[in-house]
Amino acid sequence: MNNLGSRPLHPSPEDDDFYRFVADIRRATSIDLSQYKETQMRRRLTTLRLKHGFGDFASYFAALKSNPKLMDEFLDRMTINVSEFWRNPNRWQVLLDKFLPEMIKTTPRLQVWSAACSTGEEPYTLAMILDRLGVLDSSAILATDIDEGVLAKAKAGVYPERSLRDVPANFVRDYFQRENGNFRVAEKLKRAVRYQKQNLLLDPFGERFDLIVCRNVMIYFTEEAKMTLYTKFAKALKPGGLLFVGSTEQIFSPRQYGLETADTFFYRRTV
Ligand SMILES: C[S@@+](CC[C@H](N)C(=O)[O-])C[C@H]1O[C@@H](n2cnc3c(N)ncnc32)[C@H](O)[C@@H]1O
């Protein structure tokens, strides 16, 4: 897939218009679109600007600068925000049955990070599992995303029924309350998660995490950006700590980042 790091030798006027937009966005927001795969990003942003009737990216950017609503929409659509509780249930089951019980034996106060957490389904899934294992109160869950809009929804913690379709029935019973056709997540889960705005491509990472969950965002990034991020994730883990990735995001040659495969879509820091 083409990416913005490998631009055409002879750019067309449309290419120039788009690359100028990328530079303008970087200056205005610190978001570096050149680290995202170009084809998908450009298609998504072209659809968005045409929806508002802008003939080129220059006029779209001029409007973004003066219209905060348009800017919010741009930030919201830049990547897809879709999330679900218990996404790929059998992987969460492995965490619940195997990895977390092992970790708890030596580390009762777990430091967990849900990176690119979107609207909160992932950190709340983690919180439910930690509660089942009896260590929620002693654990710390950090949940971050670049988009303040999704973080506000995550903090509100109210979800349509379809987001819960993979949640085991006993967890629905114990951790959700019905509210006007939606489901409200239990206060004890909300209290356990600390939300913070963070751009993975720009902001510093924390350290000494026992578990980092980063799923379904790396697919948007260029190969170069991914390599940098895997190295940073490995460093952010404790030795022996785990990185849990999405089901299309297998890491090739994990050893180059100081990681080894612990199970399908789980990688362990080796050194
Ligand atoms: C498809 S969602 C993934 C949600 C969740 N992790 C899951 O797997 O269900 C992708 C999220 O990545 C976030 N994102 C995109 N670029 C980012 C960046 N540079 N830093 C942090 N988050 C980013 C988006 O705002 C979006 O909420």
Image (tube, helix red, strand yellow):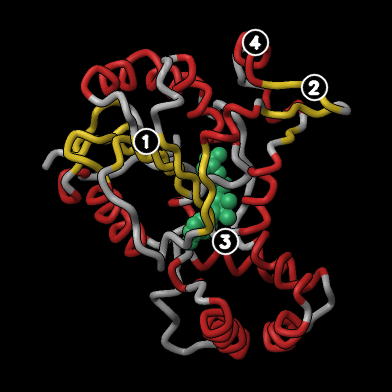
Type of amino acid at the residue the image marks with label 1: Phe
Image height of 1 relative to 95, above or below? below
Sooner in the amino-acid sequence: mark 2 or mark 3 = 3
In three-dimensional space, the C-alpha distance between marks 4 and 2, rounded to whole angstroms, equals 14 Å
Q: Which residue is mark 4?
A: 169
The numbered dot on residue 54 is none
Residue 79, given in percent of the width and then of the height, sits at 59, 57
Secondary structure, mark 3, is helix
Sooner in the amino-acid sequence: mark 2 or mark 1 = 2
Type of amino acid at the residue the image marks with label 3: Gln
Judge the density around disc 1: few (<14), some (14-19), many (≥20) Cα neighbours within 10 Å. many
Q: Nearer the viewer, residue 138 or 182?
A: 138
Sooner in the amino-acid sequence: mark 1 or mark 3 = 3
Q: How many discs appear?
A: 4
Which residue is outermost to the left? 271
Callout 2 touching callout 1 (CB < 8 Å)? no
Image height of 166 relative to 258, above or below? above
Depth check, mark 2 against mark 1: the one in front is 2
Q: Nearer the viewer, residue 181 or 42?
A: 181
Type of amino acid at the residue the image marks with label 2: Arg
Q: Which residue is mark 3?
A: 40
Judge the density around disc 2: few (<14), some (14-19), many (≥20) Cα neighbours within 10 Å. some
Sooner in the amino-acid sequence: mark 4 or mark 2 = 4
Residue 241, given in percent of the width and then of the height, sits at 25, 35
Label 2 lies in ligand 1 vicinity (Cβ under 8 Å): no
Q: Which residue is mark 1?
A: 244
Secondary structure, mark 1, is strand
Quadrant of the rendered structure where residue 140 is? top left
Q: Residue at x 44, y 82 (%)?
A: 8
In three-dimensional space, the C-alpha distance between marks 4 and 1, rounded to whole angstroms, equals 24 Å
Sooner in the amino-acid sequence: mark 3 or mark 4 = 3
Type of amino acid at the residue the image marks with label 4: Ala
